[in-house]
């Protein structure tokens, strides 16, 4: 790791480990309360926080078009979650938990992107440190809070195989995400990632029989179109800035 002795790099690594110890817990609580389809839709507010932290931390310019479509994206999100604004009062605490989680991990991703650009961090290192710290902290917490007999739940063959595949899938997806950030802009990666509500809705319907309504469909389409326009405007501004400098 280049510049590993820098105090700010060590602090960021510790922050990454601590943050992603608690974020998965918050996400699972939010998933359970909000439901799989709604949860995946809520996660798309990431681009709003991405623009906010990009402006505050990276000094990136936010245009009127981006602000307008951030508002439209938010409206599409609420439209989908409330089934056409008919259930505004029924939004549960799970929605708030997920929004806080999105804000936290978007902030960490923004800080990590700065280190990638400086070649001070690399994807494999981030995944290793993040999983190592969170794994140790969660295991110790589990042993302290729960009786030792509960370890048998983990070691039960069916559960152990499930946990093993879940860990492999999570670790691989993390590595691919961070590897992606070294090749393309985070905005482009966000556009590609914006299609996940469709896959989430499909698997939720097939495996969990979760309800997917026309309001979900309309809301998802509004969200994806908004994300594409926001990112395209952002990339066009970067190209224009480069041309002006040349």
Image: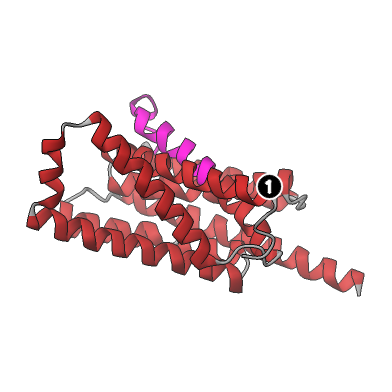
Count up the numbered dots: 1
Q: Position of residue 115 (x, y in %)?
A: 66, 59
Q: Tell me if residue 163 comes above or below residue 139 in the rendering.
A: below
Q: Horizontally, is 50 left or right of 245 in the view? A: left
Span of residues in magenta: 84-106
Q: Tell me if residue 25 comes above or below residue 160 in the rendering.
A: above
Is 105 part of what is drawn in magenta? yes
Residue at 26 percent of width and 39 percent of height: 32
Query: Does residue 142 show up?
Result: yes
Query: Does residue 191 show up?
Result: no
Q: Tell me if residue 226 comes above or below residue 29 in the rendering.
A: below
Assign the magenta stretch its main secondary structure: helix
What is the residue that sits farthest to the front in this orientation? 5
Q: Name the colour scheme.
A: secondary structure
Q: Give the image quarter of residue 35.
A: top left
Specify the quadrant that holds the C terminus.
bottom right
Packing grade of label 1 (10 A; few <14, some 14-19, many >=20) is few
Residue at 35 percent of width and 33 percent of height: 94
Q: Position of residue 104 (x, y in %)?
A: 52, 41
Residue at 37 percent of width and 56 percent of height: 197
Name the secondary structure under disc 1: helix
Residue at 54 percent of width and 45 percent of height: 14
- Which residue is under mark 1? 7
């Amino acid at each position: 790791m280049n510049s590993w002795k820098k105090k700010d790099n060590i602090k960021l690594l510790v922050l990454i480990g601590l943050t992603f110890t608690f974020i998965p817990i918050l996400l699972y609580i939010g998933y359970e309360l909000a439901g799989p389809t709604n949860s995946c839709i809520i996660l798309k507010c990431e681009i709003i926080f991405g623009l906010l932290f990009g402006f505050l931390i990276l000094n990136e310019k936010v245009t009127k078009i981006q602000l307008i479509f951030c508002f439209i994206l938010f409206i599409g999100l609420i439209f989908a979650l409330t089934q056409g604004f008919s259930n505004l009062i029924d939004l549960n605490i799970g929605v708030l938990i997920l929004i806080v989680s999105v804000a936290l991990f978007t902030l960490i991703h923004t800080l990590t992107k700065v280190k990638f650009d400086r070649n001070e961090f690399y994807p494999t290192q981030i995944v290793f440190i993040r999983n190592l710290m969170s794994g140790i902290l969660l295991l110790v917490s589990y042993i302290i809070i729960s009786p030792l007999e509960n370890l048998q739940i983990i070691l039960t063959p069916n559960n152990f195989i499930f946990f093993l595949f879940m860990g492999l899938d999570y670790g691989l997806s993390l590595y691919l995400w961070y590897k992606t950030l070294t090749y393309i802009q985070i905005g482009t990666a966000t556009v590609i990632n914006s299609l996940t509500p469709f896959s989430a809705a499909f698997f939720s319907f097939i495996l969990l029989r979760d309800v997917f309504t026309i309001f979900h469909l309309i809301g998802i389409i509004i969200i994806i179109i908004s994300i594409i326009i926001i990112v395209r405007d952002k990339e066009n501004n970067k190209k224009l800035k480069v041309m002006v400098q040349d």
